Image: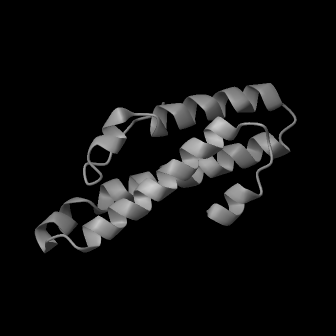
Amino acid sequence: MNQRLSRVTIKANDLIQLVKRGMVELKETVTKLSQADDQVKLMYPKKLAKNMSDLFEAVVALEQIQEGETLNRDLAIAEVFIHQTFKSNDYQADPLALNILICS
């Protein structure tokens, strides 16, 4: 994901930084979770998968902005998705309590 994100050269640094922060937080969560008790590990796979999926979708959205013909529309959609997903205080409060956001 870092390689794909590094190829995005659009002028949306705030969005890129939010996604990068999400990647760092995911890595930290996986590290902490790998050291947790087995009972705790059983509780979080679905939430981790959701977070990984959100990261992938955010990177794809940024790539589409870069490649898209409707730059303003795609940028607006990506901004809403990324801000809704990664700019939540709940996401940062407890690394093991991953934020589940339903983006509709």
Q: Nearer the viewer, residue 81 or 10?
A: 10
Q: 26 above or below 18?
A: below
Q: Nearer the viewer, residue 50 or 24?
A: 24
- How far across and down, in percent of the image, does residue 43 sit? 19, 60
60 left or right, relative to 9: left
Residue at image position (25%, 48%) is 97
Q: Splitting the image into 4 quarters, where does residue 82 fall? A: top right
- How far across and down, in percent of the image, does residue 21 sit? 51, 49
- How far across and down, in percent of the image, does residue 28 sit? 37, 62
Q: Splitting the image into 4 quarters, where does residue 42 fall? A: bottom left
Residue at image position (69%, 39%) is 13
Quadrant position of the N terminus in the picture: bottom right
Q: Is residue 100 visible?
A: no
- How far across and down, in percent of the image, does residue 41 sit? 21, 68
Q: 63 above or below 7?
A: above
40 left or right, relative to 47: left
Residue at image position (87%, 35%) is 69
22 left or right, relative to 6: left
Q: Is residue 72 visible?
A: yes
